[in-house]
Amino acid sequence: MQVLYGRHHVRVFRFGLRVVRDEQVAEDLISEVFLDVWRQAGKFEGRSAVSTWLLAITRFKALSALRRRKDVELDDEAANAIEDSSDDPEVAVQKKDTGDALRKCLTALSPEHREIVDLVYYHEKSVEEVAEIVGIPENTVKTRLFYARKKLAELLKAAGVERGWP
Amino acid sequence: MATSKKRLEHEPSEIEVLLPWHAAGTLNARDARRVDEALARDPELAKQYAVIQEEYAETIHLNESLGAPSARAMQKLFAAIDGEPARRPSRSPAMSISARIAGFFASLSPRTLAWSASLGALALLLQAGVIGAVLMRDRPASFQTASLSTNEPITRSLGPAAPPRALVRFAPDARVADITALLDNYHASIVDGAKGGLFRLQFGNKAMSKDEIAGLMSKLQNEKIVSLAVATP
């Protein structure tokens, strides 16, 4: 368990943190996730990578944690409104740092879009694995990421950053 | 061929939606080849791919900047795991901690790239313990001589002398990692486990004198995670 924990806990933590946006809650999440793994080890069928299994459990628990917190029971639109004002991509642009602006806009994406961007780019999950983790069809995975990227481009454009796409 | 820009106004093409996975290197060989060919003949697509590579790099940067969890999370987890058998009485009593550890790793090891040497060692120790237990069960009975009165021990065995064993109770706050380390340090294996919270441990594979066993028990008793250690036959 120590090896499994050592190998995956940071990524599990970061994935959970991007969903729940609270370090304490994210830390509690990883304990819950690995305890579940300990309890359900016999149910792991080996059809997917261990990391995919872990991220699927993390996602489920993170969303449950979000639902438990009344203060974050917001729809995507409301959440975005808060995120946009707090993250303020324009501030980053003033620093003439496109990378910084890009990271701010990545943070300002909706939870649904943020999740898929992270899974593909950071957690390096294939189309099939993302479909398994999120529980949506593979074609939806592809189009959801496409529209997440379009939204990202719109946020950057609104912040004054033109990248030539779309 | 229609440009990517034109496509954007409608629906993304099959190749276009695969670009992020191409950047992350997670496409299968066939799709990767198709994307490479499309990138070579479509400058607009190549431009979009450059944008994607930037997104890819910044997403990694953003996630890496999130830091790591504190040790509290790990302590909480292992405390919960250590408390598991007592809190889950519905589990089969025959399913000892050692069996659960073995079962857990047996189910996961084929899918992981490499388990550490310490876990491998633990599995070997557990296996050795089981084999040892089976062998010991079948060993010939000892007998005593009644005619000699020397300083030599009067108990002898027809088979090889057995390595020492002890009943050990670990402290309630002992973590699995600590127990694993202790087993490793003492070259010990669990031959029977968790009956009334007591584990039967076997130490090494050679017999010891009474003094050596007493010294071993004393040393074991002084371990922080051991609350009871009693030598047994």
Image (cartoon, coloured by chain):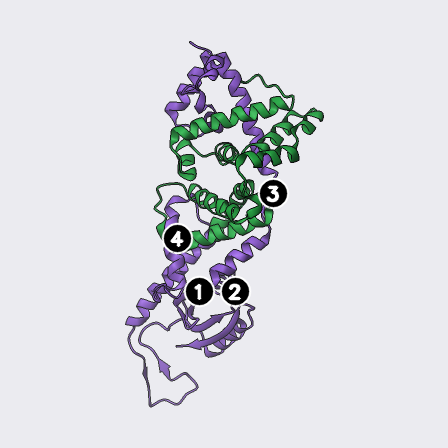
Chain colours: A green, B purple
Q: Which chain does tag 2 point to?
A: B
Q: Which chain does tag 1 point to?
A: B
Q: Which chain does tag 4 point to?
A: A
Q: Which residue is mark 2?
A: B174
Q: Give how far across and how far down residue B139 sits, in percent.
A: 30, 72
Q: CA distance from mark 3 to mark 2?
A: 28 Å
Q: CA distance from mark 1 to mark 3?
A: 33 Å
Q: Residue at x 31, y 76 (%)?
A: B158
Confirm whether circles 1 and 3 share one chain: yes
Residue A41 or B224: which is nearer the viewer?
Answer: A41
Q: Are marks 3 and 2 in contact (CB under 8 Å)?
A: no
Q: CA distance from mark 4 to mark 1?
A: 15 Å
Q: Residue at x 61, y 24 (%)?
A: A156
Circle number at residue B45: none
Which element carries disc 1, helix, strand or loop? helix
Which element carries disc 3, helix, strand or loop? loop
Q: Are marks 4 and 1 in contact (CB under 8 Å)?
A: no
Q: Give how far across and how far down residue B19 sits, in percent.
A: 46, 23
Q: Which residue is mark 4?
A: A40
Task: Look at label 3 and name its amino acid.
Answer: Gly
Q: Give how far across and how far down residue B189 sits, in percent.
A: 42, 64
Q: Residue furthest right?
A: A95
- Ranked by sequence position, the earlier of labels 1 and 3 is 3
Confirm whether circles 4 and 3 share one chain: no
Which element carries disc 4, helix, strand or loop? helix
Q: Is residue B105 visible?
A: no
Task: Look at label 4 and name its amino acid.
Answer: Gln
Q: Nearer the viewer, mark 3 or mark 2?
A: 3
Q: Quadrant of the N terminus of chain B?
A: top left
Q: Give how far across and how far down residue A165 sits, in percent.
A: 55, 18
Circle number at residue B87: 1
Q: Which residue is mark 3?
A: B67
